[in-house]
Amino acid sequence: MEHETIIGLEVHTQLLTRSKMFCRCSADYASAPPNSHVCPVCLGMPGVLPTINRKAIEYAVMTALALQCRIPEFTKFDRKNYPYPDLMKGYQISQYDAPIGVQGWMLTETAGEQRRVNIKRVHLEEDVAKLIHRTDSVGESYSLIDVNRAGVPLMEIVTEPDLRSPEEARQFLMKLRTILQYLGVSTGNMEEGSFRCDANVSIRPEGSADTLAKVEVKNMNSFKAVYRALEFEASRQRKVAAERGRLYQETRGWADDKGVTQPQRSKEYAQDYRYFPEPDLPPLTLSPAWVDELRASLPGLPEARRDQFASRYALPEYDARLLAGSKALADYFGECMKAYHGPAPEKRAKTVSNWLLGEFARWINAEGMEIHQSRVTPPQLVELVEMCEQNALTGPAAKAVFEEMFRTGHPPREIAARLGLTQISDLSAVEAAVKAAIAANAQAVVDFRAGKQQSLTFLVGQVMKATRGRANPGVVTEILRRELETG
Amino acid sequence: MDLHRLTIHEAADLLRRRETSSQELTRACLDRIAAVDPAVRAFVTVCADGALQQAGEADRRITNGEATPLTGIPAAIKDNMCTRGVRTTCSSRMLEGFVPPYNATVVQSLSDAGMVMLGKANMDEFAMGSSTEHSAFFPSRNPWDRARVPGGSSGGSCVAVAADEAIYSLGSDTGGSIRQPAGFCSVVGFKPTYGRVSRFGLVAFASSLDQIGPITKDVTDCALVMNAICGYDPGDSTSLNQPTPDYTRSLVPDLKGLRLGVPQEYAVAGMQPGVESAFKAAVRRLAELGAEIEWGAFLPHTRYALAAYYIIAPSEASANLARYDGVKYGFSAPEASSMWDALEKTKQAGFGAEVKRRIMLGTYALSAGYYDAYYLKAQKVRTLIRQEFDRAFARFDALITPTSPTVPFKIGEKMDDPVQMYLSDICTLPVNIAGIPAVSVPAGFVDGLPVGLQAIGKPLGEETLLRIAFAYEQSTDWHKRKTPL
């Protein structure tokens, strides 16, 4: 029997607000010493009260809008009760039955096929403290608590079980992350834990509406891990089904090093969270006018940006989509084009795009860097492009200059001059190199005169090599042809 | 002169005229505490040094002409309000050694006004109780008859004022915890509208019901303390962003033009005849003062208030008390084999029986499968009760009831029967359920034991209540009677 895979995702993402969700402590704790960003409120001390971070509400509404959600006027916070040492109050302030956004959707594209993934809800809650488990010299285990993370705004985005393959889940997550980055609400960094994903995976006989047991998979710390974990889990379930075994509803953790999902012991006594409305926070009314204001001020999202690149610069669809697929790259491209007011902007755009998607992307990936870490600034890249346009650099020389720019952050003219890579504009120097090549390659000259065109290409290569790429290949070819035909 | 017997306004007059100093006044109170507190046990913690230091500062402020009506006046604070540098125990083993690094907003407001803090007042553990017998340390005793309870949970706060140990005090009221002991001790106790006074720094029992209020020797003092503690606090999202009037302007001695309703629903089974006759006499007095009185059935749903209260309050408490895990502050069980074992042992040994009972009640009421039948239904009852009060207040400026159906009961009398204990709040509970203000004023004695009169007002109707309480008080001398101590 054929089975299809059913996947639903639960994404938790920290919001880039300055302060925490319910107190004034800084939410930027990444490089802070343990327990330095804490106060009586986020420590859950007796008698203290939460106050809502307005910016967090704004970010959640923006996200919900970008995901085509309906924003109900009434929203409220609830207490989710469970005992655990990472939870300062013994309950987490979350949202239960009146989330910020409901009934949204997002399109995913996998192998050219577009599908709509429904978003169940977008809600806000507070992050919990970080536990660090240690073992002392006599083998006794103990745990340390760092409360810096406790109270950082956390947004939860829950999809309907609409995803049908691990690849689709991965595509969904990458696109979601891009949207969050475009909105400026989250770094979307999975490795650092500011963007986390749990998945519900089940299989069902093709054509059936009933899934077998739903398995929750946790502890996936990269996009690749999500893909591998879901691949593993779906095939594990298929195998159990094929062997007529029984599938259980359970929580499994992804063990990245072993490449398997393993049953996880539940960390709570029971799964009854005893939700009830948070009495310390009155319900919120999100006025439709305010929501409309936010809607109007949403920054361009990847699809809008892609269409803009395609129409304004006549970029091929392929280029436009790749550039828009990362906010940082799209911004970089935008910066490069901003200063350009010359003729044929579409030609310039294509050249810049070629550089960004070619050498630039290659070096960024090779070094494992983020785009914002690049030492090459947009004006420097533009300068390099202009040098090529003015024939001041040949193609190979430009690549060498770029490599040096990437390493040092120095401007291209300075590098070209230092490396002596500026194109040879002195015709007599090129002629001398051509004559030397003809003299040194008698056989090739004979072959060319016998009608063998490849010999010309060979000779051009010899001249380019001799001039270390600084000669203009077009000029070299022209002079070669003239010398060979008259000589 | 017995300085400790003064009211706020009497003491403030003497201070202003430099006929006494805050230090003298404070010493008189500390001497009184030393003399009588062993007999009544109002205080969990006495801050003699801190109080005298604050009195010295107050005297300087008075000399500089920067005094407020509360500057230099010694007060007691219920031990569930956080006081920076002074342990705040909630009369619980769980917080026996807890010293907050912050002040509750009310404590800060009073400090800014020049309060001298004598100490922290005993209470039922985490404010759960009606007799102060549920204090984990010791019960407080009623100064009118030390074999009897002072009421609760703000028992220590009321005893301190009734026994002239403190000039005034703060209490908190979740189901009657200011008014019932105020009635039992023959002092004035005011529970403001929910949100009128910031709850920031008040250790939470039931967040949607808790409200801080003053406990004073007379209604004038009540208005003075209200002026200092009422008002919006951005640190408490449930506090009301409304201007605070000058409450002393409500202190007028007649009730002409006021319509008062006497809901017969409060003629509950178990009302003592003495209390009933004292209450009827008080209502007659209100009529003599010019109020129009109407007797009738206005609040049929209030008989469900007790049931709703004992679902909502424990539910919220079950979450509010979850933070006491022995990890960050407070009591921590010393011998434990694991993290979970430590958590269980800490709660077992740190909480008293009544607290555990309420945590269990609340946990049960919120559990999956029971939520709709209990918590949700209780919230619906709450809405009905609110609407009923709204309708009543369309006709009346205030409602009048006894504060409690009985005079103070004997220590130990109700300890084995929680439901009987709960019933002693039957007249005060519906007020918290509806979030409205109410005041208890001394209304006489039955065989030497105090009776309280309760006036209930519409939301933000504090001024009307103060007027009623003041006019009534000025026509009697109940508030001038002193305990036998």
Image (tube, coloured by chain):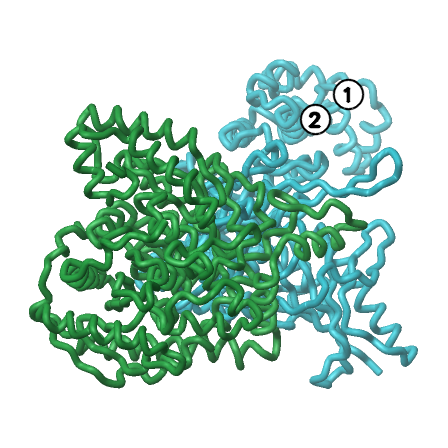
Chain colours: A cyan, B green
**Residue A319 seen in the figure:** no
| Disc 2: host chain | A
x then y, percent, for residue B335: 77, 47
Q: Is residue B434 left or right of residue A162?
A: left
Q: Quadrant of residue B76?
A: top left
2 and 1 marks on the same chain: yes
For label 2, the residue is A480
For label 1, the residue is A437
In the depicted view, which residue is nearer to us: A462 or B213? B213
The residue lying at 57 percent from left, 29 percent from top is: A376
Q: Quadrant of residue B54?
A: top left
- The C terminus of chain A - image quarter: top right
In the depicted view, which residue is nearer to us: B483 or B46? B483
- In the image, residue B25 above or below residue A432: below
> Are the residues tagged 2 and 1 within 8 Å (C-beta)?
yes
Query: What amino acid is found at the position of numbered circle 1 in the picture?
Result: Ala
Q: Is residue B427 left or right of residue A143?
A: left
| Disc 1: host chain | A
**Residue A46 seen in the figure:** yes
In the depicted view, which residue is nearer to us: B338 or A124? B338
Query: What amino acid is found at the position of numbered circle 2 in the picture?
Result: Leu
The residue lying at 79 percent from left, 61 percent from top is: A265
- In the image, residue A93 above or below residue B175: above
Crowding near the residue tagged with mark 1, few <14, some 14–19, many ≥20 C-alpha atoms within 10 Å: many
